[in-house]
Amino acid sequence: MSQATLHIQKISGHAGAVPGAGMARELKEKQVCKLVDTTTCIGCKACEIACQEWNDLPFATTSFDNTYQTMPDTSWNFWNLIRFQEHTNENGTFMWLMRKDQCMHCAEPGCLEACPADGAIVQYSNGIVDFQTDNCIGCGYCISGCPFNIPKFNPATHKVHKCTLCADRVAENLEPACIKACPTGCLHFGTKEDMVYQANRRADQLKKHYGWANAGVYDPPGVGGTGVIYVLHDATNPELYGGLPKDPHVPWIVKLWKHPLKWIGNIAIVGGVVGTFMHYLRYGPKVVPEDTAKGGE
Amino acid sequence: MTNGWIDIKNTDMAMVIGGNPAENHPCGFKWVMEAKRNRNAKLLVVDPRYTRTAAVSDYFLQIRAGSDIVFLGALINYAIQNNRYAKEYVANYTNAPFIVREDFKLPEDGLYSGFDAAKQSYDKVSWNYEPAGGGHPAPALGPDGKPLPPKMPEVVGYDPTLENPRCVFQLLKKQYSRYTPEMVERITGIKKEDFLKAADMFTSIRKDGDTAKVATIIYAVGLTQHSYGAQMIRTACVLQLVLGNIGRAGGGMNALRGHSNIQGATDMAGIFDILPGYLKVPVPVDKDLKSYLERITPKPSKPKEWDSFNYWSNTPKFAVSLLKAMYGDNAKKENDFCFHYLPKVNRRYSFADIWNDMYKGTVKGLFAIGMNGVMIGPDSRKNIEALKKADWLVVGEIYPDETSEFWRSPGITEEEMKKINTTVFRLPCAGFAEKDGTFVNSARWLVWKNAALPTPGDAKLDQEIVARIFLKVRELYQKEGGKFPEGPLSASWAYSMPQNPSLTEVAKEINGKALADIEDPKTKQQMKAGQQLPSFAWLRDDGTTMAGNWLYCGSWTEAGALSQRRGLEDPSGLGIYPNFAWSWPMNRRVMYNRASCNLDGKPWDPSRKQIWWNEAAQKWVGNDVPDFKPDSHPKDHMGPFIMTNEGVGRIFTPLGLMAEGPFPEHYEPFESPVENPLHPKVSNNPVVKKFTTPLDKFGNTGEGYNIICTTYRLTEHYHYWTKNNPALVQEVPEPFVEIPAELAADKGIKGGDRVRLTTARTDPTTGAGSYVAKAMVTRRIKPMQIDNKLTYQVGVPIHWGYRGIAEDEGKTAKDPANLLSPTSLDPNAHTPEFKGFLVKLEKV
């Protein structure tokens, strides 16, 4: 079910106006944002466990994979993964990059866009994109709609899951569980405005005092900006950080399908209905031959 | 820690060496990040591996395990050569100006003056200061006509200009002049230019005579666990003294403790050679209380014009108050306060010695409560063999562990199992969340915690287990007499529930109370009999006070338990939080904080004011509690290091304070791939302690053991018990060996392949004592050139054994990492050499 104390502004697969969209609830209306400062992440993975514990997700069975990374990718019961990447930069300095991967809570969410099930994906007015599992039909379109490869299918239940940005906690004015667990202050939570300010300030500090000329903030405009932003040592190369896409967009196929194709389809449907009606007016009801109507025994 | 966790936020420069706080102390490590975020502080990390701490550093140097003295010594050399040391501090707050005896010799050849090769020990008489006026007074004679152990001269000769060639400063300069950037490259594997870059960075805080900036050194067992580990730590201390960083906010020498209460365990004397509060144990020459106190109470030793508080001169008060806590009313002046019931320690009884004695059959039984001895090692195989020979073993744990099931260790046969006659008693204990009491953290804070849960099933609290055993043993002494019943029969056990003492009562007993009405002669303030004492300044040596640990006196006063305080006020903004918990000694958050001021008593950095001299009030005041004689005028030149005889920081440790010598000298690990380039003839620590059983073998490169191995913890696990936690097993499911990519390529090893490590201690026929795990092939450990020889290091995390979730599911039992480690001990602290020994590596 949706988190009733948060205010829904968009709904997947839903025709017509969003119920209650005009209501104003001051504290929960502002865009919220998670700030992940990769330059202070120590890869302790406290956020991974905090996420699982708060969201009651069962622990996974993992196997050795020549890395400190817990598993190769996020999964339906593991929404928050620290990605570890070894990298040697141009001046020969070795780096071990760690990035917290989770749902980015895009302002223009591809998952929501792609989802055909009424009310399975919602976006609250504070920007959180949340899956309403009860309404999920398991079609997996959200998976193809996401430019960050986040939604994950549970084959046992045929439902798709991802990070909720702890919408239930945020609704109670608490920070998400991962933020609460972070020991180094690498993770911050607040309004988007505040987080962007803080992120830029940190990036400036990295440029000025720590020699990271390309330090910057990752808040990709291709998806309208995100509810999770990163400070990167090298913002010109986000791919280094466990494959963060440089310029993510909602896939064209989803856009095509949900916009021109949908309207063409809608027109086709309306056309079909109108055509049928016109046909009725012109030719009257279909007369069923008697023998067929009896049921053909 | 001389300082504390939060204080790290005040630093300008942090060096992490021999530690990995991001992984092993992530919550405390936040303060390093705070310093970086808010002060633009720099972080230098020196480690054999590129760790997760290195990942957030500003500069990382890969060092060969066990060569840190060379690196740190070269930093001292660099600071002196480049005029980047704290001149006023060094000349006044350390023993740099003290003049050393003429017959003292530096270890250019690896040996200090006075070495006796046959005994493998030193005659330390020349390791001493010269008295003012010169000469070597003959040692005083004891009542038996034999010379007494040498003492420091009461009035020391000194040269405030630091120019006398025999003053400590000049000797220091000479000692480390051999530790050149070239020598750093040869021994540590750190390239000369990389060293110079790091040296410039770290000592930049004293560039151009700057005295305001501060650097901290943060370390853990990466410095401790070597056959000369105490000297490694001392090298870092000397560096901090030379740079004037001790006593200052954002500075200090900060040991990170690997357990939540290891500081408390040390304070309360969980070691054989001290009593609570770091009082020395009695030894056989201590015929009575008087001679014991005379031996252990230091006398001031200082230049005539200077002053020394010599706080340890109060030792008799602390010792008698301890005896009163131990023996209660039975401790009387007439019977030397039951001093005679204390054991007189005649030899080393360190952890490794106990296992060695069990292996040899002289120790018949063991209590292992909250301690997984097989896994801790060193040389787990020897410990398993020792347990097979024991008559009995009592284990108190919350999980079945490798020690209580030593008879199931990998490779053991059914036939062998049948031959083991050790009776094992398993006592279900309480977990940390089921107990109240204090944790004493790395910052010396006593922090009270409440029990969160009741103990499950038959599990009992530790104090109930110990109390019941004690009461039963005492009952047996009462009934049957025995060899020496006086000790146990005289012990005080004044708890309202003798079978299960409350930790509130125990904590109050440790704090201490007045046993008679007493009065402070100066202030005329009075304490009534029975009142909890507010400070150790109240302790008496006449039996009118008691305290279980003088250092904790002030933690539970008439005002209640200060350890339970949770005040969040921090008026100075320095992170002192004076009303949060309670820090020993006397709630001082930064020790030796007199050194945070210049000679006139003014803070070196006005933006970080800890304490200062208030001329109007004629006393020391401040944001922190002054760690100093409160009314000592700066003109009196009292040294800030009030716990030393000299009152100053010891760059030179006189007499027997350090077993290897007064200045740290680099020795090779007991198993090393190279001969010591400084002095090949004296390659290893000449006074190392080791054992001689058939299992105590040591490998060398000639036998093919040429890969350096080190052990460590991972952030995902905690020692040997989180393998019972499904969340953490998920995070890192099984053990591995971290192998440099180049070495792996050389051996045809790919990530995930099973590899075997063997040592000189591995049985060549059965393979017992070898270690098998999957290979983690990585670029985070790089090959090194050590003395022009290609050298590899590999790493093994310590967390797995033969009990745990995966192990109990019938999957293959894992080998304990400490099957590999050797038993070569630091002669000062008796710590085994877990960091840096030799192995062979092969693909299985």
Image (cartoon, grey):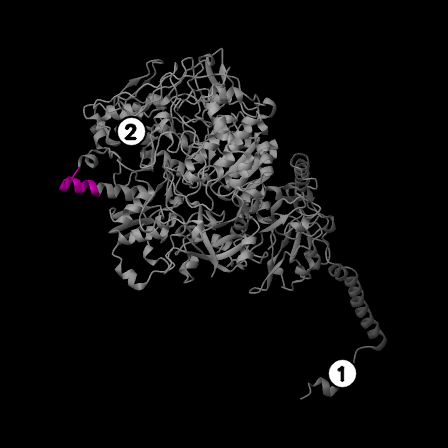
Whether residue B519 can be seen here: yes
Quick one: quadrant of the N terminus of chain A? bottom right
Viewer-nearest of discs 1 and 2: 2
Marks 1 and 2, how far apart at CA? 109 Å
Q: Quadrant of residue A263?
A: bottom right
Q: Quadrant of residue B442?
A: top left
Residue drawn at x 30%, y 40% is B349
Residue drawn at x 38%, y 17% is B131
- Per the image, label 1 sits on a secondary structure element best described as loop
Magenta segment's dominant SS is helix
Q: Which residue is mark 1?
A: A288
The residue range painted magenta reads B472-484
In the rendered image, the vertical position of residue A207 relative to residue A58, given as above or below: above
Magenta segment includes A217? no
In the rendered image, the vertical position of residue B174 relative to residue B817, given as above or below: above
User: Label 1 is placed on what type of residue?
Assistant: Val
Magenta segment includes B480? yes
